[in-house]
Amino acid sequence: MNDTTDTGGRDFIRQIIADDLASGRHARVVTRFPPEPNGYLHVGHAKSICLNFGVAAEFGGRCYLRLDDTNPVKEEQEYVDAIVEGVRWLGHDWDDRLTHASDYFQQLHDCAVRLIRDGKAYVDSLSADEIREYRGTLTAPGRDSPWRKRSVDENLELFERMRRGDFPDGAHVLRAKIDMASPNINLRDPTLYRIRKAAHQRTGTAWCIYPMYDFAHTVSDAIEGITHSLCTLEFEDHRPLYEWILDQLDFPARPRQYEFSRLNLAYTITSKRKLAELIERGLVGGWDDPRMPTLFGMRRRGYPPAALRDFASRVGVTRKEHLIGMDVLESCVRDELNRTAPRAMAVLDPLKVVLTNYPAGSTETLPAARHPDDASLGSRDLPFGRELWIERDDFMEDPPKKYFRLRPAGEVRLRNAYIIRCEDVVRDSTGRVVELRCSFDPETRSGTGAQADRKVKGTIHWVAAHAACRAEVRLYDRLFSVERPDADADGRDFKSFLNPASLDTRRDCQLEPGLAALPPGTAVQFERLGYFVADRVDTRPDRPVFNRIVTLRDTWARAGNTGG
RNA sequence: UGGGGUGUAGCCAAGCGGUAAGGCAGCGGGUUUUGAUCCCGCCAUUCGUAGGUUCGAAUCCUACCACCCCAGCCA
């Protein structure tokens, strides 16, 4: 096998496209991402967006962002705007290819008329209940509607009157005339058009009949010259209908539909209905709550769009049902942030340290690199003084074996500063440790020669009390406590699986001063703790608010060690 | 009891008749002023099961098993 024909490692869709391009079946690939503007995009959509836009970019083709707005009673402009913003945030571009199914309402109508003329569609006057009854069941064939034999002229006239608004909702529908006995239920004379006397967010009251998904989607694909129409597995049974519609009309383009499995992420849900329910009941703060698997939730959480793209590519594209662990997503986020996020120090649960041999009233400034592997990020100056804050977890009076942070009479390195030794532990009346009296070794200041490199077991982070900036930090954890909250196990409602500890707000955190003015949405690493982002809605220079994006990998904690 | 799909490691996933890639997780070791990063090494004698074809099968054939999707005038 030679390099130019090697298709190994590519998913089946990319293989098909590569073959179609190589064989000349298509000169250029054209895809589309067709969300319905009835809700917010989530991580599952991100997979589809990255596939459709990604494939077009990789093969030098084009991708349309097409809003599938065929049901005015469920759709809103607000969602259209959010979708557009979300796809752009993910890093994709569509030039002038932002379209709507509603752009094609006239052509869709004309196609419907063409089907009627050809005897391939008819107006049915059965009620919705009757249609269901006539449809048969999974194992029993359906029966023809008594209206199935209407003449072309009568169908034409009725459809025109439907269009004019002569009938109320539900009085008639336009159906394809295929086969009521088909083992594939989608072929049992599927509905093509229904009456909906509702204003559409884009076309207003110009129409009162609206095309159904299968018809609108297929014709839109044909109009836009989509070559590869990629959708999820549940539409597999619709493919014969997709083909049937294309067969009846003579568009120059012949799109083909390919299905792939939708993304399932462990410990969360992606049902629009269920996500909305969490919001309605006040169980989360909104569509952009940092715990939500929505694009806006992940953006506010601080997930970089590049990490989401990496995630989509790591997960791959197949036809197999799967459940992807959060660890994969978090690994992508860490990889990206490790490369790009400046380092800083912050203490989330402050414990006071007084350096008894540090001259009272004096302070100094210590330089510290912003990134250990990227000098181009430069350095910052850290204020240092006699009183410091350290993490309460970084001190233990009676530590377990192999604990190498601070302990009574023990030494530890203060990151970017000096080695200190714990001389005394101060307690309040309840016995709680409230302060550590320590000595520091002036010879060990970071970066100042031989003595400075003295080795000690541990290094901890700190913030100088006199210059610290107080802040609120929100620690997030998985939204649900079970892998498949959606599974309705034991008949339990998904909400009963919510993780009560998914949000832990710390209001008395101490940050190094440079962090106060960080622009909203900026991600940094709080060394030894994790990656954090200045909250894009709540943070203020005088009152910073940070969200924990993800913790650092922590082999100490995962080895079963808790607390300190 | 109809139709359409899917089964490769704990979780994903390559494989396309020539002797099981890679990632995540995990485990061991090295470097380290972040218990991070980085670096090395280990981690499927076996591909849902049982037969068959073949010199040779995860790949082809047969049967069986398990799981998912479909009965909106939603998408």
Image (tube, coloured by chain):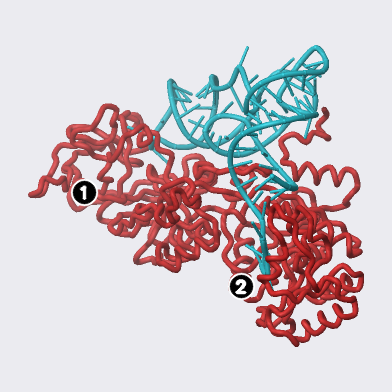
- SS for callout 2: loop
Chain B color in figure: cyan
Taking A103 as reference, is A405 above or below it? above
Which residue position holds label 1?
A352
Give coordinates of residue A414: x percent, y percent. Answer: 30, 40
| Badge count | 2
A79 horizontally vs A355: left or right? right
Q: Can residue A364 be seen here?
A: no
Residue A431 in view of the camera: yes
Where residue B56 sits, quadrant-wise, is top right
Res A381 label: none
The chain holding disc 2 is: A
Which quadrant would residue A494 be assigned to in this image? bottom left
Quadrant of the frame with the N terminus of chain A: top right
Residue under the image location 33 percent in, 43 percent down:
A461
- The residue labelled by disc 2 is A74
Q: Where is A523 relative to A355, above or below?
A: below
Q: Do the residues labelled 2 and 1 touch (CB within 8 Å)?
A: no
* Chain A representation colour: red
Q: Where is residue A359 in the image (x, y as percent from the top left)?
A: 19, 47
Q: Position of residue A309 (x, y in %)?
A: 62, 49
